[in-house]
Image: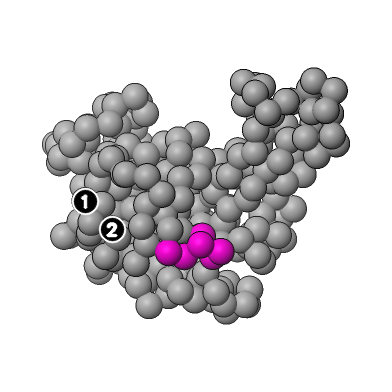
Amino acid sequence: MCGRYTLFTPQAELEERFGATPERPLEPRYNCAPGQALPVITDDAPDTMQLFEWGLVPTWAETKSDAGFINARSETVREKRSFAEAFERRRCLVPADGFYEWTETDSGKQPYRVAFEDDRPFAMAGIWERWHPKARQSGLAEFGQGGADDPDPESTVVETFAVLTTEPNATVSGLHDRMAVVLAPDEEDAWLDADPDAAGALLDPYPDDAMHAYPVSTRVNSPRNDDPSLVEAVEA
């Protein structure tokens, strides 16, 4: 699976790499976690990095808390009710420069960071949704339920995303039985624009000879920790 990742590449480099401008300034992130607002590049706004919440909420969910899928399996993404429509119509790039995986050791779970040797940014394949509260859809806001100034998070429109996963390459297989779908640069436009069959053909493991994995501090286990020391190598 992919449950944490990094994105500390300077904003100017990200803009050049993806040809997209953030909707607001980006801060370096060393521990991107589910539930956080993180940059994505969607098929309907390829020139902008928008901030969507990590944890896809399907359009049919009764409440936001009913779902929050951080990953979708590439082998079944077209079959699952939660993901099928998003795969057909709403794909996105999820910029990153590394991701974390955990492996069991005698002393507990040891986190590893997986990245390119030069820490260059890349795109993970994602899907996105725009969830509308049922109260607003049914017009109940007119009767004082879910009004425009309602602070209840269940009353606001939420844009969310999930990262697709696939079989691991040799670099990741010793850590986990799944890995994020990492797209080659020349596959990114196709992921956003291609028909579903062509897009589905892109969901394979990234070649392992270009990536490496190294142990990092268990401080990454807490999403409250988010600083450069998290990506420094430690003794496993």
**On the rendered structure, is 88 left or right of 21?**
right
Residues packed near mark 1 inside 10 Å, few (<14), some (14 to 19) or many (20 plus): few
Toward the viewer: 148 or 204?
Answer: 148
Query: Looking at the rendering, in which quadrant would you find the C terminus?
Result: top left
Above or below 138: residue 163:
below
Disc 1: which residue: 10
Q: Which residue corresponds to the image point at 74% horizontal and 53% vertical from the top-left? A: 81
**On the rendered structure, is 105 left or right of 77?**
left
Q: Main secondary structure of the magenta part?
A: strand
Toward the viewer: 75 or 53?
Answer: 53
Marks 2/1: CA–CA distance: 6 Å
Q: Which residue corresponds to the image point at 14% horizontal and 36% vertical from the top-left? A: 235
Task: Look at the image and say whether residue 87 sits in the magenta stretch.
Answer: no
Does residue 168 appear anywhere in the picture?
Answer: no
**On the rendered structure, is 138 left or right of 171?**
right
Q: Which mark is residue 14?
A: 2
Q: Which mark is residue 183?
A: none
Tell me if label 2 and label 1 are in contact, CB under 8 Å. Answer: yes
Secondary structure, mark 2, is helix
Above or below 144: residue 160:
below
The picture quadrant where one finds residue 187 is bottom left
Q: Give the residues drawn in magenta, as a range.
A: 42-47
Residue 184 lies, in percent from the top left, at 36, 72
Residue 85 lies, in percent from the top left, at 70, 60
Q: Which residue corresponds to the image point at 45% horizontal and 39% vertical from the top-left? A: 37
